[in-house]
């Protein structure tokens, strides 16, 4: 089988899928724009750069003739676009014989609501697809606002060989470390996390806040921590290599994902934390309530509520047995539902299913 991925080459998700397909003996090639290109990833996965002839969204439309020629030359069995509003549109215009599209979040929750034209383009793209994929049920339901076609739910699991519980029995029980690993933007609720921790810290002074990631609002959040008097117990690590993320998560007593928008379509960060045996506190947006079992693997709160975050943190901080039980339940939950290798093989089975349809 030959698969063409139409997606950002520099995306860790694109690269992860491509390497998996290669490991299964599948010929794979990534088609991407230069500003989405990764020279490092291209050393491992054959990658073609698409010409960017026009600015913004028009570039996807303008690249169609070039992509059509590239596909004719290589003749893959399947063309799979990621992001329905961008690479998805390009793939739909090409009108390939077997065309799959994956929705990712903002492209289906936000973009079609911005204008009537956007809505029509999303509907057009979905109408051209042989198969449509979503990482969560809630996003599949949203996708069905724009198509009456069946949407396959394909969770984006985590590598449980890398994300696993700490084996260090000497981990400090007296200090509560609350943390997250996210881009530093308002849509991920970082300000709510800082405020919630500040409320929590008043009752639990022997606690720390660990925020890993970078983004345009980092300075704003650092100033907020200073204003709330928690600067000395708050660490902003900045962005770290993906290989270091499991180690950082294992340092945490509680992992928080207080996102504010439904475009948090799956919640892979929460799944990674559960795989590491860390109880999670998440907001009730997007796919987060879908991956976290309330009061079993974590606690689900209302979005934009520092007070509820603080209450959840206190509940877990007061009870080490509860934290341990939720951590163990999280590990089991991930192994059963969100193991990357199992999810990847399921996606491959769908490829074979839809590729055989005439």
Image (spheres, grey):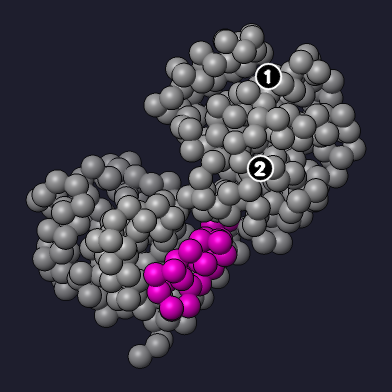
Q: Residue furthest front?
A: 116
The image shows residue 195 at horizontal and vertical percentages of 63, 23
Q: Which residues are magenta?
A: 132-159
Give the SS element for disc 2: loop
Residue 316 as seen in the image, left or right of residue 5:
right
The image shows residue 329 at horizontal and vertical percentages of 80, 51
> Where, quadrant-wise, is the C terminus in this rendering?
bottom left
In 3D space, how far apart are the residues under numbered discs 1 and 2 (Cα atoms)? 18 Å
Q: Which residue is mark 2?
A: 302
Q: Which residue is mark 1?
A: 198
> Where, quadrant-wise, is the N terminus in this rendering?
bottom left
Give the SS element for disc 1: helix
Res 104 quadrant in image: bottom left
Q: Residue at x 54, y 57 (%)?
A: 156
Q: Which mark is residue 80?
A: none
The image shows residue 171 at horizontal and vertical percentages of 79, 26
User: Magenta segment: does it hold 151?
Assistant: yes
């Amino acid at each position: 089988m030959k698969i063409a991925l139409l997606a950002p080459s520099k995306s860790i998700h694109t690269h992860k899928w491509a390497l998996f397909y290669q490991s299964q003996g599948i010929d794979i090639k990534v088609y991407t724009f230069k500003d989405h290109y990764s020279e490092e990833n291209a050393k491992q996965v054959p990658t073609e750069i698409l010409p960017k002839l026009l600015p913004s969204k028009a570039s996807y439309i303008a690249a169609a003739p070039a992509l059509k020629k590239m596909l004719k030359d290589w003749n893959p069995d399947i063309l799979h676009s990621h992001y329905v509003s961008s690479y998805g549109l390009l793939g739909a215009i090409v009108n390939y014989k077997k065309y799959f599209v994956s929705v990712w979040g903002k492209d289906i929750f936000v973009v079609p609501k911005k204008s009537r034209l956007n809505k029509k383009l999303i509907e057009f793209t979905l109408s051209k697809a042989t198969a449509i994929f979503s990482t969560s049920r809630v996003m599949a339901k949203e996708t069905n606002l724009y198509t009456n076609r069946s949407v396959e739910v394909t969770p984006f699991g985590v590598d449980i060989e890398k994300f696993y519980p700490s084996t260090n029995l000497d981990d400090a029980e007296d200090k509560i470390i609350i943390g997250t690993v996210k881009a530093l933007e308002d849509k991920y609720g970082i300000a709510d996390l800082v405020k919630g921790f500040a409320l929590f810290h008043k009752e639990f002074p022997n606690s720390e806040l660990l925020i890993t990631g970078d983004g345009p609002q980092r300075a704003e959040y650092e100033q907020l921590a200073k204003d709330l008097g928690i600067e000395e117990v708050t660490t902003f690590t900045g962005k770290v290599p993906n290989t270091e993320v499991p180690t950082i998560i294992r340092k945490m007593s509680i992992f928080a994902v207080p996102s504010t928008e439904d475009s948090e379509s799956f919640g892979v960060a929460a799944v990674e934390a559960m795989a590491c045996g860390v109880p999670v506190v998440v907001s009730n947006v997007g796919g987060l309530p879908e991956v976290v079992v309330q009061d079993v693997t974590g606690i689900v709160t209302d979005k934009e509520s520092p007070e509820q975050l603080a209450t959840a943190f206190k509940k877990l901080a007061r009870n080490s047995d509860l934290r341990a039980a939720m951590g163990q339940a999280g590990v089991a939950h991930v192994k059963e539902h969100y193991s990357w290798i199992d999810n990847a093989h399921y996606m491959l089975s769908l490829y074979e299913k839809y590729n055989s349809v005439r």
